[in-house]
Amino acid sequence: MDTPLSNKQLKEQFVSNLTGSSLLEIAALTVTLPILVLIRHSFNSIPITGNSLKKKKDDAPSEHRSYKAYLSTLTLDFLVIVVPMLLLFTVLADWSYTIASLFTILTLLYIAVKRPGGSSPVLEEPNSFRAYITSYRVIVMIITILCILAVDFRIFPRRYAKTETYGASLMDLGVGAFVLANSFVSRQARNIASVNWKTAIVSSSPLIFLGFFRLVTTTGVDYQVHTSEYGVHWNFFFTLAAISILTSFINIPPQYSGVFGSLVLVGYQFSLMHGLNHYLLSNERGTDIISQNKEGIFSIFGYWGMYLIGVHLGNYLIFGTHSSAIKSSRWVRTRVWVLAILFWLLTLLLDRNVERISRRTCNLPYVTLVVADNLQLLSILTLADLIPGIKTSVLEEAFNRNLLATFLLANLLTGLVNLSVDTLSASSTTAFFILVFYAYILSIVIGIADYFDMKLKFW
């Protein structure tokens, strides 16, 4: 008689042996999500400038009124941006193509109607690519915090969960998007003088600490861990720390980092196709630390190459030597759209003729997919200059100032929900309301922290 599986084993099985969705569906989702943000930005009649709603020390009588207005605006942001995203990831998942097509048509019509004669009554100075980056980083974070809990419920489509070996899914893009988002605005992209290796290790120590903290806590509470993702002991925080240290040890000028990163990726892909894949994808593990964590350790080369490409793109599009005045809105928008299309074509070519996309090994096709999808997201956000409105919402400002705190709190709440609720047996209605409540609590806590100028910063 077979021994019944434990709840932990059932949850691990629930996220195992998955093959992902199509690249077209991923592209469709990447069309819809940034348009939700643009819709919120276009609400001119409702105050969405964070600073105007913040508490002012010399305006004590209006403090209560301002605080209520801030929370009201934050809640509106949540209802317009976060809740529709959650719907797209759950009950509306089968309508992704229809919704993407409808949103695209309506957005183009809105732009055409609102720009008679080419004039645009924007309330902020156009060509604010840094504002696009803010929205982009926040969208990546919102997708991440929604998916890391939603994946444990049956309401979340299995095709959106992380793939086992080959294929692509919404959640597969999370780690890569996080790495790329950091690289766009990194010290290297801004061409700031590099730090020495001791300083690099010290600055990475919070990530190393978080990595060990996650390892100890997940082991201590017997939390479900998918071993084939990173290995037995490795996790996402260790990968980020390793990239930071590597980039500091090997200092590449941003204008050459794209070429160097490409060489790293090509060399790594060559190694994968000539024996390394067999080792990494084998279920056999030795007792040494490298074999126990082979996926996490070797995939560093892929993520590092991706990071270097992001550094080059960030420097080229945002922080380069060209004058900001020269980089008009059209200059930036055109280049982002062209780069997005080129990377999508490159991804299709590599996926069909070199090797299928694999997040597990972070191979070359996976890297180009992440870059393509993130540039597509950015390219749609650049349409903000063609739509009347303000560049960022209160929710985006709050999340952007506390991205690390948002991610840590989301992980903590996800763990608490999993330990207190049998997610696999929860009905769709129950699961959806739990997810909405979880996301709202997270948004309110981070929003209040930003209102009172509290920021989690380790270095």
Image: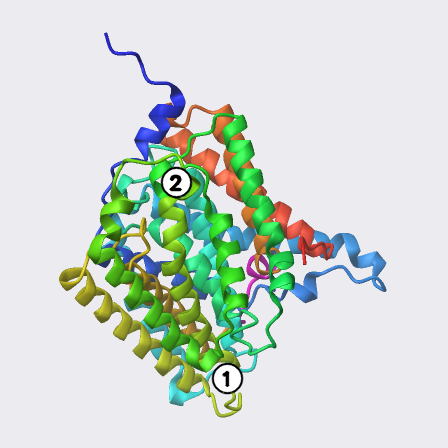
Asked if the magenta segment contains residue 391, the reply would be yes
- Check disc 1 and report the residue beneath it: 320
* Label placed on residue 231: 2
What is the x, y in percent for residue 348? 19, 65
Vertical placement of 432 versus 393: above or below?
above
| Residue at the (37%, 36%) spot, across then down | 226
Measure how far apart labels 1 and 2 are at the Cα level.
38 Å
Number of numbered discs overlaid on the protein picture? 2
Please name whichever residue, 348 or 459, is drawn nearer the observer in this view of the structure.
Answer: 459
Asked if the magenta segment contains residue 110, the reply would be no
What is the x, y in percent for residue 292? 39, 38
Which image quadrant for residue 50? bottom right
Vertical placement of 452 versus 156: above or below?
below
> In the displayed structure, does residue 290 sit left or right of residue 340?
right
Residue type, mark 1 in image? Gly
In primary-sequence order, the first of circles 1 and 2 is 2
Vertical placement of 2 versus 221: above or below?
above
| Residue at the (43%, 51%) spot, across then down | 143
Magenta segment: 390-398
> In the displayed structure, does residue 180 sit left or right of residue 170?
right
| Residue at the (32%, 62%) spot, across then down | 367
Name the element at disc 1: loop
What is the x, y in percent for residue 29? 31, 56
Task: Please indicate, yes or no, whether residue 42 appears anywhere in the rendered image.
Answer: no
